[in-house]
Image (cartoon, rainbow, N blue to C red):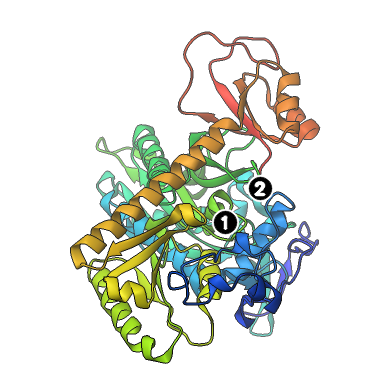
Amino acid sequence: MGALRLSSLSLVRPTFSPLRRLPPLSRGCATSTHSLAKEPEADAVTAGDGHGKASASASPLLECAVTPRSVDFSKWYLNVIDKAELADYGPVSGTMVIRPYGYAIWEAIQDYLNVKFKETGHSNMYFPQLIPYSFIEKEASHVEGFSPELALVTIGGGKELDEKLVVRPTSETIVNHMFTQWIHSYRDLPLMINQWANVTRWEMRTKPFVRTLEFLWQEGHTAHATFEEAEKEALQMINVYKDFAYEQAAVPVITGRKSKVETFAGATCTYTIEAMMGDKRALQAGTSHNLGQNFSRAFKTQFMDENGERQHVWQTSWAVSTRFVGGIIMTHGDDAGLMLPPRIAPIQVVIVPIWNKSDEKTSVLEAVATVHNILKEAGIRVKVDDSDQRKPGWKFNFWEMKGVPLRLEIGPRDVTKKSVVVSRRDVPGKPGKEFGVSMEASTLVNHVKLRLEEIQAALLQRAISFRDSNIVDVSSYGELKEAIAEGKWARGPWSASDAEELKVKEETTATLRCFPFEQPEGEKKCFMTGKPAEEVAIFAKSY
């Protein structure tokens, strides 16, 4: 592609968190011999076929253990990404390599959203990654908002280019260039497309999945004949994201409208879903923008209406990215590692066979194969870990680290009883274990499906309770400062100016996350100015 030169405003090289490299999990999630000596039940086939202690939380000497969340949340997050084999650092500072397990989570997001996009009338397509710099300059607020993050190509084929090319930071400009060629009449509207693509933004401070120099996303773009149609579309798509967050990811987002200060560069209005992470910071998990006619006027994207008059189209754009993977990690993970909601887990059930004597192996593995086939035929994503290199206790910890919702354990006694042991990832230790669950096909399938749905619901309810217990209603600026200082979200009536909003950010580092769609009734007074307010707003520190 030739040399990559940065714009004059992006000279600082992005870096990840200071914790650059951790012992890679690919070398094994080993257990020290001292740990084994203390807890032989984890790996032996005595006293219940080895269905005893075997959790990361119970074995602090495990080399695969992560930094506790309460000690250092950022290190914990990076540890989990490494140990659960989700991603690794790329050779260019600020980039990451998404490993197969991490990409499988992204594919689960894609699978759900692709269906919803097509159900709502959108078609997938693809636009070039390189965009003429003159396109970016056409919309004034757009170029101002994105200039610090642009990566520019100035040399191609060994020669200086006549015009700089921008490596796609977003696609509103090139989309409008093409829409202008495709839209001529009201009969061509609405035009509704989506693309799955990579994006480059030269971020100064990066964090895997949450904020990287390059990331993956989907971006939808639509053109309409009226403002009302565009507004309906923008709201429809933010609700698609909200439904995904609640129903699939078990992340209880708050849906609302961004302030003018936080609105996307070039949009007239931005809608957002805001999620509370495990450290109580906010994560903007998805956005939908009503672009008005800002881009259509800049690019002269017009159509002939039913009265024979030329009109500019009304547009929207909306996006969710691999940032959502980071949101899932930080919402549900614990000190034992990743914890995945069953509906998006690449592996919903892992089966761990347990045997001690060689003559037990055959019968155990035959039972395991039967159970595997029963669950697979029922549409359950299941994996057997029958490797000889690791003992059951190590496997228990490894699959807990990877967040698999259910573990089935099958040993010689289970084979005799024609039953399995079921362990829930979200309920550690013996309280999460069920013994003697029948291997009979319909009984087992129904039991497993029921437990998966229970885990899905439990994770959502746990996240809702955590969120709601950490949102404080405030009636003064002092109360907001106190809430933010405690790491909580502050919610209160707001009608103050943009300057006062920026003052809050400067003095507390918290930003106005959104004006929630769900608003309390009754008269309100702005906690900043004391003047009447029509809405409450949420402020929080964020990623």
147 or 409, nearer to the observer: 409
Q: Which secondary structure, mark 1? A: helix
Residue at which label 2 appears: 543
Instruction: Specify the amino acid type for callout 1.
Output: Gly
Q: Is residue 386 above or below residue 104?
A: below
Residue 30 image position (x, y, % from top left)? 64, 77
Front in this rendered view, residue 406 or 332 = 406
Quarter of the picture holding the N terminus: bottom right
**Side of 102 where 343 appears, left or right:** left
Near mark 2 (Cα within 10 A), the count class, few <14, some 14-19 or many ≥20, is few
Disc 2 element: loop
Q: Farthest residue toward the bottom?
A: 358
Q: Are marks 2 and 1 in contact (CB under 8 Å)?
A: yes
On screen, 188 above or below 53?
above
The residue identified by callout 1 is 326
Q: In the rendered image of this protein, does residue 523 appear above or below residue 510?
A: above
Q: Residue at x 52, y 53 (%)?
A: 328
Question: Label 1 crowding class (10 Å Cα cut-off): few <14, some 14-19, many 20+?
Answer: many
